Image (tube, rainbow, N blue to C red):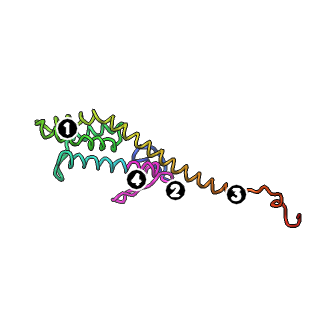
Amino acid sequence: MARKCSCQICKTKGSTDVFYKVTDDKGKNKYYCSKEEYDSFMKDKENREYLIKYIAVDVFNYSEGQIIPPILLKRIKELNVFYDYEVIYECFKDSKDNIKYWIENKGFSSEYGMVSYIMKIIESNINDIYNKWKYKKSQEQKKKNNDLNLEIINEITEIKQVKKSNNILDFLDEEDV
């Protein structure tokens, strides 16, 4: 018997028969609209964690356990409204040397000022990175579609290889001859 439940991501109401069920570490069941939505949510979560770790360790040279400024997390969340975490990561990776130079030479008086300055660098470069990322994704999609089309074409050519005959004797049975 189905019970009512709601999606953990979009809060859509539904039943336990239809929704995708995931049991967490504590044994509690959580429901999602579909497996695809859940997988997308988990991939996005992993990308965010990877981005934050990259910024803390590689860009800011923070030690393990050192607190990341909350304003940075807020500004990244604002960027994520439109840009994917992969794009933000690529932008940080591309601007890493520039950011490190300004961290060392600018002499910031507070972390808030440093983060604001860094985010302005990121915001000024992110549209270029986004366009490159979008182009790369479209090329991957075209390649995937072309691979699929080649497989279909190969199957069709194998099917069409039927023996063609122009001789009348090929159509007659042994009794007719």
Q: Earlier in the sequence, mark 4 or mark 1?
A: 4
Query: Relative to the observer, which residue lies in front, 40 or 20?
Result: 40
Mark 2, secondary structure of its residue: loop
Neighbour tally class for label 1: few under 14, some 14-19, many 20 plus, Cα within 10 Å: some
Mark 2 → mark 1, Cα distance in angstroms: 53 Å
* Earlier sequence position, callout 4 versus callout 2: 2
Residues under labels 4 and 1: Cα distance? 36 Å
Q: What's the magenta region?
A: 16-42
Residue where numbered disc 2 is placed: 1
Residue placed under numbered mark 3 in the picture: 162
Question: Would you name the residue on which mark 1 appears?
Answer: 115
Residue type for callout 2: Met
Q: For the residue marked with disc 1, what is the amino acid?
A: Val
Residue 86: in magenta span: no
- Of all residues, the one furthest to the right in this rendering is 176
- What type is the residue that disc 4 sits on? Lys
